[in-house]
Amino acid sequence: MSSRHLYVHIPFCHRICPYCAFFKHTPSDTDLRGFVRAVAKEAELRLPAGFTPRTLYFGGGTPSMLSPTHLNALVEGLRQVADLSQLQEWSFEANPATFTHAKVEQWLRLGITRISLGVQSMDTATLRMLGREHSPEQVAQSVQILREVGIPQVNIDLMFSLPGQTLPQWRHTLEDALDLSPDHISTYNLTYEEGTPFYQQFGQQMVDEETDEAMFNLTDELLTAAGFRHYEVSNYARPGCLSLHNLACWQGEDYYGLGPGACATLGHTRYANEEDTPAYIQALAAGQLPPHSTESLSPADKRTERLGLWLRTDIPLPPVFLRPQDGSYIQALCAEGLATYSPASGLLLTRRGRLLADEIVLGFM
């Protein structure tokens, strides 16, 4: 079945946060008009005729950095190749305090349905430590703007297990986030990625698994009590507000990726564009695909990836993806209270099991 999902990577940020390992950079002397043309050209070269995505995700970087002119040009370029009229969801990442009512009104006119705000914390000192430029008050103002304009869904991204962060501080951030009445909350356990300033500064510290678990459990308790569905290890949604794009990826559906650093999975093939914006623009200006790597995935690779992602969700893994030889391992997981299994519905990890999802998947390899 052909892919119905599209990801577009916008690698630009005003400043580089010390914990972030995604491909990103300041615009500096990047030809933004050339970048927009390049993404449109890649869409022309990569997407099949009649491509009609069900979900579209603009990630980064900071997509909201694009000026109205450049964003309009980018979307128009995509519409020359893809039919965006059937989108069920269009997600767009933004930073608080970086947009006005007028900018959000443009997003709504374009058809964007879901804004994901990179909040990270509702504590002023923690935000400063993370290199974030907004304040808790500006987060509230940004959510208010999105609501006043009429964006259908608002997501708030938060991080826990930060250097020096206490359990009461994390509770405070969660409660303040709930006070804003978002439709979706993503909560990520900070990992120290090699190549980031945070890794150099804090990466040699021992991971405190006890604190991680306490913060994870507190998150689950507070957000589910507030009516959120804990539908993936790091994600909570009000009824009807699940991230359709991310859910498709977690369930192993194919997706295309455009932009420098973007990757895609199509059947048993994965491609990844090199993390080099000038080379990306140059190649596409010449009518060629950007520098990229291609990987062939074996059936075993695909199965391991599917299990690794699907088991993080609250949707049972269908029995068709399990093998007869997995039976004894599944029994052991159920006996330890880490999973439940039914031949009719499939395999589902418990709350404690999902906390250990990455380790549990290794037993199916």
Image (spheres, helix red, strand yellow):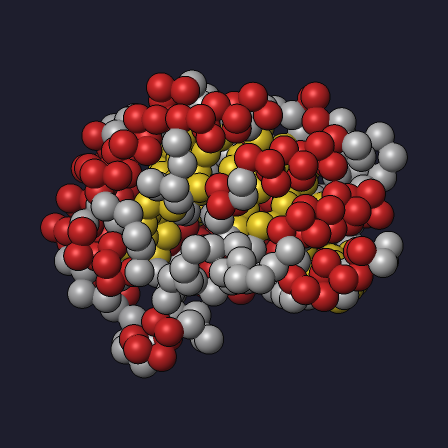
Q: Residue at x 64, y 44 (%)?
A: 7
Considering depth in this image, is 4 or 146 the residue closer to the camera? 146
Q: Quadrant of residue 109?
A: top right
Q: Residue at x 67, y 29 (%)?
A: 54
> Relative to residue 165, is residue 317 drawn left or right?
right
Q: Quadrant of residue 126?
A: bottom left
Relative image position of residue 204 (x, y in whole percent) = 32, 81
* Direction left: furthest residue: 168
Q: Is residue 66 visible?
A: yes
Relative image position of residue 278 (x, y in whole percent) = 68, 64
Q: Residue at x 72, y 61 (%)?
A: 280
> Relative to residue 234, is residue 315 drawn left or right?
right
Considering depth in this image, is 210 or 187 the residue closer to the camera? 187
Relative image position of residue 303 (x, y in whole percent) = 67, 54
How many circles with numbers are drawn on the protein?
0
Considering depth in this image, is 125 or 320 the residue closer to the camera? 125
Relative image position of residue 299 (x, y in whole percent) = 75, 57
Q: Quadrant of residue 57?
A: top right
Which quadrant is the N terminus positioned in? top right
Considering depth in this image, is 39 or 182 the residue closer to the camera? 39
> Relative to residue 95, is residue 247 drawn left or right?
right
| 309 is higher (above) or lower (below) than 149 | below
Which quadrant is the C terminus positioned in? bottom right
| 360 is higher (above) or lower (below) than 48 | below
Q: Is residue 350 visible?
A: no
Q: Residue at x 52, y 37 (%)?
A: 92
| 148 is higher (above) or lower (below) than 46 | above
